[in-house]
Image (cartoon, rainbow, N blue to C red):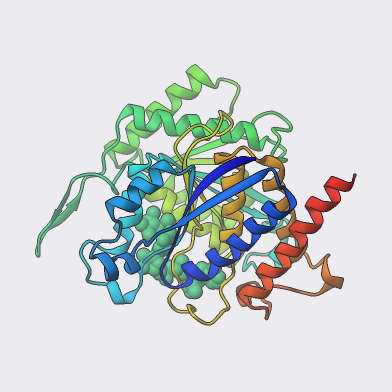
Amino acid sequence: AQTYKILVLPGDHVGPEVVAEALKVLDVIEECRPNLKFERSFGLAGGSSIDKHGVPMTQAVLDKAKSSDAVLFGSVGGPEWATASPNPESGLLQLRKHLNTFANIRPCEVYIPSLVSASPIKPDLVLGTKFIVVRENCGGAYFGEKVENPDIASDLWVYTRPEIERCARVSAAIARLLGRSGDGKGGGGPAKVWSSDKANVLASGRLWRAVTQDIFDKEFPDIELEHQLADSMAMLMVKDPKRFNGVIHTDNTFGDILSDISGGLTGTLGILPSASVSGIPGRGRCNGVYEPVHGSAPDIAGKGIVNPVAQILSLAMMLRYSFILGEEADAIEQAVTMVLDAKEFGGLEIRTGDLGGRSSTVEVGNAICQAVRKVLNKRDSV
Ligand code: NAD
Ligand code: IPM
Ligand code: MN
């Protein structure tokens, strides 16, 4: 059997609740595909690691992450660690840096009626939205030198040419995979790439723009590239989301913010997955950290109502990008659609509250498991 080593870091608050559902989905894949084995080990991250070890990420966990094929990450942080130093969030940043997951892929799609009805945007404006934010993940203001004193603090927002180049190569690869038609198979030629920066104000933004333009001119002349200032992009994403169908190539800070705007478009962060990868998608296996865009949602933790879809779709991204198991990834995505679309289970609406439903986290997870089983078994019997 093919064996894949996964380090599971559930983290804090809702992290463990959603990770439990993703692991059930993984069980179903194993059950339907006896030739695939997913070896799992578990560790602490964030606040739960601070409580036990005094730090948000131990060297042992970092080592384990490196010797694994991929990391399934829940979410970290919460009010109880508000004054902790280092804080829970810095553990996640350490992990990204340690694995050199330099690009963070964050898709946003509004394609079925149940999702349109959860969106605060007018239906005709939002239906058909499909873009993928590619966020630089190991540089910029997040990782520059810090000064932190009681009366003055600074974060150095620094980029080098190679850092921008490698992220641009991921954006280009994603544009090819997505395709202009958005079919995920490159239909209609490569998708358009929008590069977002503040070249009008930041020196690092000017470098971002120049290096991005260079790389596309030299290596990807067939891919359409347009630059958009990050502030006006934020406005236009809300006003006319489909305008940016394609790939949004941007730095660490802007990517963080623009990918939460995705949650404003869908009406919830609960369905938005992400993949932090250490290589170019489509070029073979690579390590990665697979985590929802959302955080630990302390306001709804422990109630069994958190939406597990973002975590489950992050698992699908792991199968696709780290393990090159496209068929199994497709099956998970199809199963999520079947459940959200209420086409399964006799039209029963199995959705959590953030999508306007009344189902629990576990009910949604179970329904997706059942749908995955159905998709994979059906495929086998054809
Ligand atoms: P958040 O993303 O945790 O929550 C924002 C809002 O969205 C909340 O109202 C929450 O209930 C809701 N929400 C989030 N995920 C949901 C889901 N799956 N289903 C239903 N509703 C959901 O953002 P926040 O409140 O600003 O941050 C809380 C903590 O999480 C902070 O400590 C922050 O630093 C941390 N955080 C961690 C990660 C991560 O670990 N990857 C990411 C973002 C934020
Ligand atoms: C995210 C989060 C993280 C980030 C935090 C928790 C470090 O907001 O993954 O979007 O800012 O990158
Ligand atoms: Mn964020």
Q: Residue at x 40, y 59 (%)?
A: 43
Seen as rendered, the residue at the extreme front is 1
> Which residue is pictured at 45% across the width and 23% down the height?
215
Left or right, 44 with respect to 308, comes to: left
Q: Position of residue 85 (x, y in %)?
A: 20, 64
- The residue drawn where x is 53% and y is 64% is 19
* Res. 116 image quadrant: bottom right
Residue 2 against residue 372 in the figure, above or below: above
Q: Position of residue 259 (x, y in %)?
A: 49, 54
Q: Is residue 366 above or below residue 26?
A: below
Residue 228 visible in the current orientation: no
Which of the image's four quarters has the C terminus? top right
Which residue is drawn at the image coordinates 61% and 47% (left, top)?
37
Q: Nearer the viewer, residue 249 or 138?
A: 138
Q: Is residue 247 left or right of residue 276?
A: right
Residue 228 in picture, x, y percent from top left: 47, 41
- Left or right: where 243 falls relative to 70: right
Q: Which quadrant holds residue 326?
A: top right
Q: Nearer the viewer, residue 119 or 140?
A: 140
Does 325 sit above or below residue 302?
Answer: above
| Image quadrant in which the N terminus is located | top right
| Residue 236 seen | yes
In the picture, residue 157 is in which quadrant? top left
Q: Position of residue 180 (x, y in %)?
A: 68, 35
